[in-house]
Image (cartoon, rainbow, N blue to C red):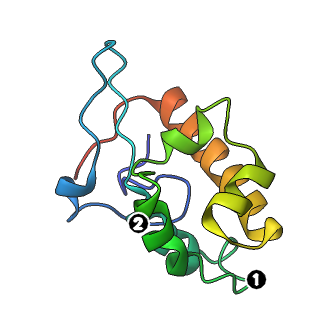
């Protein structure tokens, strides 16, 4: 496990302990970042941010629809690219990238377990 507390988006959540989801009640001690913070990390990531989507602009739309944590996107069987694009009124390509990155990052967090806040 890396010491940087990176969630796969190349970012560092050291100073953002209040933006982390508490461990789940089912015993799986996985900490997920809030979508708002995670979208900013996507934008600043050297690879994920290179296409200029400006993912952070969508944060208010996620909040309006009560999407708070990235696992809501990746773990939900009812969120599709088309539905997300429609609900948030965003481009299908942006919705696809967001769901793809959320799925990758949630899988990484589940695999690595609890992230250290160092």
Determine whether the residue tagged by mark 1 lies in a helix, strand or loop: loop
Location of residue 33 with respect to 58 vertically, above or below = above
Determine whether the residue tagged by mark 2 lies in a helix, strand or loop: helix
Location of residue 67 with respect to 27 vertically, above or below = below
Q: Name which quarter of the figure residue 97 lies in.
A: bottom right
Residue 53 location, x and y as percent? 69, 81
In this rendering, position of residue 58 left or right of residue 114: right
Q: Nearer the viewer, residue 78 or 6?
A: 78
**Residues at marks 2 and 1 touching, judged by CB atoms closer than 8 Å:** no
Q: Give residue 51's mark.
A: 1
Q: Name which quarter of the figure residue 113 lies in.
A: top left
Q: Name which quarter of the figure residue 12 lies in.
A: bottom left
Q: Earlier in the sequence, mark 2 or mark 1?
A: 2
Q: Quadrant of the N terminus?
A: top left
Residue 73 location, x and y as percent? 58, 44
In front: mark 2 or mark 1? 2
Query: What is the spatial separation of the Cα atoms under label 2 and label 1, in whole angstroms?
Result: 19 Å
Q: Nearer the viewer, residue 6 or 75?
A: 75
Q: Give residue 36's mark.
A: 2
Residue 95 location, x and y as percent? 72, 62
Q: Residue at x 27, y 49 (%)?
A: 20
Q: Give residue 25's mark.
A: none
In this rendering, position of residue 76 left or right of residue 30: right
């Amino acid at each position: 496990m890396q010491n940087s507390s990176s969630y796969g988006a190349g970012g560092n959540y050291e100073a953002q302990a209040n933006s982390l989801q508490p461990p789940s009640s089912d015993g799986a001690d996985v900490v997920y970042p809030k979508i708002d913070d995670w979208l900013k990390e996507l934008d600043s990531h050297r690879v994920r941010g290179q296409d200029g989507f400006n993912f952070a602009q969508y944060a208010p739309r996620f909040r309006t629809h009560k999407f708070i944590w990235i696992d809501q996107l990746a773990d939900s069987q009812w969120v599709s690219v088309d539905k997300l694009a429609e609900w948030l009124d965003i481009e299908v390509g942006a919705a696809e990238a967001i769901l793809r990155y959320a799925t990758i990052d949630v899988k990484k967090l589940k695999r690595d377990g609890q992230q250290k806040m160092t």
